[in-house]
Amino acid sequence: MPGRAKYLMIASMDIDSEHESLFNEVYDTEHIPSLLKVPGVLRVARYKREELVINIGGQAKKIVAANEPMYSAVYEIESPEVLTSADWARAVEEGRWATQVRPHTTNRRHVLLRVISDTE
């Protein structure tokens, strides 16, 4: 898989409703663009949790996501070292994220995943 991410870092969190608009604005216009400049960051996609209904055992079942954060960002990166680089450390503190948004986030979770199979 030349040129493809071999790792995913997923950052998930909640934000109080009072700061949700600012959260989304800053994430899209400042935070992601800063992190995309970090060498080794290949792509970033953001997601918002929705209700999950899935067929299991021949029946549609509603899966309750108890305590799962509402928002997630998936960072495609070349290696885990990207996350401890000076460029990453600088980028995560830029703009309004560190002072005006991060303090209002809760239920934060970070996960690093290594690709072990890719069918494309």
Image: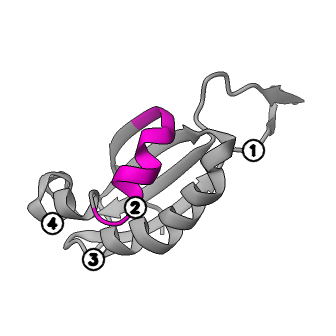
The reply to whether discs 3 and 2 touch (Cβ–Cβ < 8 Å) is no
Question: According to the image, label 3 marks what residue?
Answer: 37
Q: Identify the amino acid type marked 3.
A: Lys
Image quarter of the N terminus: bottom left
Q: How many marks?
A: 4
**Residue visible at 35% across and 66% down?**
95
The reply to whether discs 3 and 4 touch (Cβ–Cβ < 8 Å) is yes
* Residue 55 x/y as whole percent: 82, 35
Mark 3 and mark 2 lie on one chain; the one further toward the N terminus is: 3
Mark 2 and mark 4 lie on one chain; the one further toward the N terminus is: 4
The reply to whether discs 2 and 1 touch (Cβ–Cβ < 8 Å) is no
Q: Which residues are magenta?
A: 94-109
Q: SS for tag 3?
A: loop
Mark 1 and mark 3 lie on one chain; the one further toward the N terminus is: 3
Is residue 97 rendered magenta in the image? yes
Question: According to the image, label 4 marks what residue?
Answer: 87
Q: Is residue 106 visible?
A: yes
* Residue 21 x/y as whole percent: 65, 58
**Residue visible at 32% across and 43% down?**
112
Near-viewer residue (120 or 71): 71
Task: Give the mark toward the camera: 2 or 4.
Answer: 2
**Residue visible at 57% across and 38% down?**
14
Question: According to the image, label 2 marks what residue?
Answer: 96
Question: According to the image, label 1 marks what residue?
Answer: 50
Residue 118: image tag: none
